[in-house]
Image (cartoon, rainbow, N blue to C red):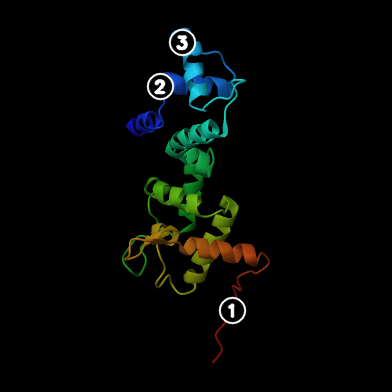
Amino acid sequence: MKEIYQKIFKNGLTPNSFYVLICVKEKIIPDKSVNKELECSRLKADNWLNQTLQLTDKSIIFITEIDGYFKKSKKKTSKSLMGPDFMDKIKGYVEIFPNKKLPSGKYARVPAKNLENAFRWFFENFDYDWQTIYKATDRYVTEYEGRQYAYMRNSQYFLRKQNLDKSFESELANYCEYIQSNPDDEIDYFKELIV
C-alpha cells in the first residue's frame, strides 16, 4: 500500500485527487467530504483531465498501472484452480497408486492433503483436466505394475519433483501430453518378451 501512495505523490497527485480520477473513470459522484471543484481544477491544470472533465491518456495509463497492483495480489484459490470438489479428485488420483511399499522402500501413496500444494502448482503450470490426469496416472501405474513397480515414483514425485537447481519437473505432465497426443493408444496387457 505504501508503494501506491508513493507513486500517487510522485506523480503530483493527492489521495483526494486520485479518488476524483477514479470517480470520473467509474462515472460516480465523489463523496461530499471531497471538494470536487477544487480537485477537478487541479487535475485539469496538470493535464489529468481535459476541459470536458474526461480522463486524458496520461490518467488512463496511471489508473491502469495502479489497478495492476491489486490484480497481481489476488491469489487463486485451490477451488478456482482445480474445481469445487478438488480434494475428492486428489483422493481419486492417490487411489490409482497401489496401497503398498515400492521396492525403493517408499509408500506408493502419499496422503491427499499433502498433495494439495503440488496440484496447485500443476494446475498453474499445465492445462490438463482431471480425466486426462486419471488416464495418464493409470497408464503410468499399469506400465510399472508389469515390472513389479521397480523404479516407480510415488504419487507425490510423479506429480511434482524438485530438481537440484530448485526447479520442478512433472512426469505426470509428460504422461498427460502423451495421452492427449495419442488418444487411441492403449497399453498392450498381453505383451510377452520373446527371446
Q: Residues at badges 2 and 3 in contact (C-beta under 8 Å)?
A: no
Q: Between residues 77 and 103, which one lies in front from this camera angle? A: 77
Residue 108, how many percent across, how many down? 39, 60
Q: Is residue 165 left or right of residue 22?
A: left
- Looking at marks 2 and 3 on the same chain, the residue that comes earlier in the sequence is marked by 2
Q: Residue at image x 57%, y 16%? A: 28
Disc 1 target residue:
191
Question: Mark 2 packing: few (<14 Cα in 10 Å), some, or many (20+)?
Answer: few
The type of residue carrying mark 2 is Pro
Disc 2 target residue:
15
The type of residue carrying mark 3 is Asn
Q: Residues at badges 3 and 1 in contact (C-beta under 8 Å)?
A: no
Residue 187, how many percent across, how many down? 60, 70
| Residue 107, above or below 47 | below
Question: Dot 2: what SS?
Answer: helix
Residue 134 image-quadrant placement: bottom right
Q: Between residues 52 and 164, which one lies in front from this camera angle? A: 52
Disc 3 target residue:
35
